[in-house]
Structure formats: structure tokens, C-alpha cells
Image: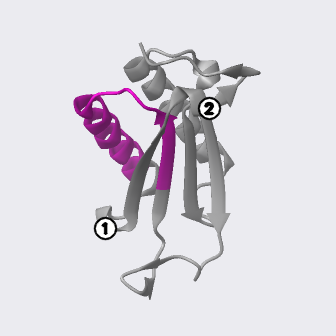
Amino acid sequence: MPLYTIATQAGTLDGPRKASLAAEITALHVEIAGVPKEWVHVLFQDYAPGSGFSAGQPAPMVSLSLTIRTGRSADYKRNLLTRLWALLRTATAVSDDQIVIGLQEVPPSDAMEMARIMPDVS
């Protein structure tokens, strides 16, 4: 169920770097959450230069939105966010003031994958 959506300015990440970052995110999520790798999904979206803004000014910002099932502890989420930040910073080489990460939680009963309603977090 974890769905990672990463938006970057076109040219920030080429194909091989996207594949590498997706593999790193998948391995991190499997390690931390203990879920099968088949449950981890990463989607990249590129936006045109001049289409990203920070503080009202054009900027090559990086945005990561993560959707997970509810039920994880605050410590779990802080650890995950901190480690994701480091992965993004390394992969994109943008400055810390250009990275934004948002975590969204949905009840397992509101998510479906592989033709099944998702189970509760154990």
C-alpha cells in the first residue's frame, strides 16, 4: 500500500537515478515496515522548469508525498521521514530548503491492493 509520489523539476533525476532511488525507497520501506516489496509503489512526476516555486520564487524543489495505512507510531513516522529526507537530498543534490515531504495516512479499510482490502497494521 505505501505509495510514494515524487515530483522533481525535469532533468533533476534521469532514468537510472530514478530507478536507483525507487530501489532505495523500496528497501527502506521493507526494512522499516516489514511489508513485502510488492506492496511498495514509487511514482515519479517531472514538472517543467519554471513550474515549481518556493517562497513565491521559481525553484527546483523536490516534493515527496507518501500515503500509508494508519496505525504506525510517531517514532516510526519520524524515523521514516528522516531517512527519506536523506535519500532525497543525496539523490537530487537540492538544498534542504527545496525539499518537502508529506505523509498521509488512510484507514486500511479505505485502501485496496492486489484485489484485496488492505489489512490492519500489525
The residue pinned by badge 1 equals 97
Q: How is the image coloured?
A: one colour
**Residue 111, image quadrant:** top right
The residue pinned by badge 2 equals 111
Q: Residue at x 68, y 48 (%)?
A: 15
Mark 2 against mark 1, which lies toward the viewer?
2
Q: Is residue 74 above or below residue 56?
A: above
- Is residue 12 shown to the viewer in this render? no
| Image side of residue 65 versus residue 38, left or right | left
List the single residue furthest toward the right: 115
- Which quadrant: the N terminus? top right
Callout 1, which amino acid?
Answer: Asp
Highlighted magenta segment, given as a residue range: 64-90
Residue 78 position, x and y percent, is: 26, 38
- Which quadrant: the C terminus? top left
Q: Residue at x 65, y 63 (%)?
A: 46
